[in-house]
Amino acid sequence: MQAAHLLIFLSGLLAIISIWAGAFAARFKAPLLLVFLFLGMAAGEDGAGIPFSDNGTTYLLGSLALAIILFEGGLKTRRAVVKLAILPSISLATLGVFITAAAIAAAAHMFGLPWAQGVLLGAAVAPTDAAAVATLMKQSGIKLPDRVAGILELESGLNDPVSVVLMVLGVELVLHPGAFTLSHAILLTCRELLGGGVIGVGGGYLLVWLLRRLKADPGIYPVLAFGGAMAIFGGAQCLETSGFLAVYLAGFIVNDRPHENTAMVEQFFDAFSWAAQIGLFLLLGLLVTPHELFALITSAMVVSAFLIVVARPLATLICLAPFRVPLPQIGFISWVGLRGAVPIYLTLIPVLSGLPRSVALFDLVFVVVVMSLVVQGWTLGWAARLLGFK
């Protein structure tokens, strides 16, 4: 019992410290999520000495946190934004992820990494992070054209499913290289995206119906919405479709079909999403062992530089140019493609699958994410001024 009480105390203390540290760091325009990540590392084995190495628990809690973050992202997505930016966003969230992952995999192979390992690395670092992008845009206060803001918002909410598919395909390519076929990859992609879309839309409308039919104390409605979001995410995942896409679409539909308690549900998830972000980054920081990262700094710098300067700009240009997005806007969208918790979370899939060198992949992607938050996060204002947005 004493251990349980100590765990509760430490969790609360870390949350309080994280919030105050984040408020202080915001004065210096430091990316808030980076602060939470570093606090988790400081609390871990090389810092305060809290031992934590449970990948399974991290995957479980990480899935729960991402489901909350994506549902809240859907709740904040307005119909006007969807109409304005849906096609370029879908292009960037699907084709853009494939191009980014392929470019990273090809570059990694040139440096001697096997193709299968390169695919795993590319799949991990390809998606932008909804929490990181949304938090940074709030923090910066930059006034963007509606279409640019909409593309950034929708892309970061929609690109996780494709990255998960690529990661699963990469794991299968390592474990069963002889059984891997193009038709299997296409079938898996269609099942994930189409199945997740159907479950998300159907589950969203069902949740709206339940929220409208229920006659109860107003405080119950956010709890019902939370239960619905978890059921939609978990059900989609159990059916081997994309729970990430499903829960994001469900959140959008709940917001798009308002009822008398919509505002209360949105306020609840706004607060709960912050709790999920803080908890997820603290947990990922705890899981890593900082002194083991130093040997990977050079490799991570190469991957980060190629990702930021070559892979992401190439994917953004190819995906957005057909929609006549001006070059300065393409440049800014490319630069704001921050990596966050999702790439680190994705590397838990090969770790839990028992793949060789998967722990090294986890550590490498962790450092890449840190570099992305530092380089892109801290230079966002400079990039906006350079491209004429501030």
Image (cartoon, rainbow, N blue to C red):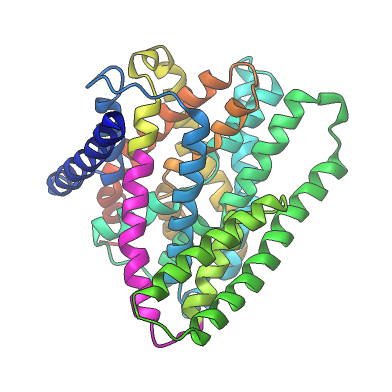
The C terminus lies in which quarter of the figure?
bottom left
The N terminus lies in which quarter of the figure?
top left
Where's residue 10, x and y in %? 23, 35
Q: Residue at x 54, y 76 (%)?
A: 253
- Regarding residue 132, the answer to whether it shows in the image is yes
Report the label total.
0
Is 302 covered by the magenta stretch? no
Give the farthest residue toward the front: 1
Q: Residue at x 48, y 63 (%)?
A: 71
In-front residue for pair 68/133: 68
Location of residue 115 with respect to 10 vertically, above or below:
above
Chief secondary structure of the magenta portion: helix
**Left or right: residue 259 compared with residue 50:** right
Q: Residue at x 73, y 61 (%)?
A: 194
**Left or right: residue 71 compared with residue 24:** right
Q: Residue at x 62, y 44 (%)?
A: 164
Magenta-highlighted residues: 257-281
In-front residue for pair 105/339: 339
**Left or right: residue 355 compared with residue 6:** right
In-front residue for pair 227/107: 227
In-front residue for pair 65/211: 211
| The quadrant where residue 268 appears | bottom left
- Regarding residue 92, the answer to whether it shows in the image is no
Where's residue 80, x and y in %? 48, 80
Where's residue 283, x and y in %? 37, 35
Location of residue 202 with respect to 243 vertically, above or below:
below
Where's residue 124, x and y in %? 56, 36
Is 265 covered by the magenta stretch? yes
**Left or right: residue 244 compared with residue 176:** left
| The quadrant where residue 266 appears | bottom left
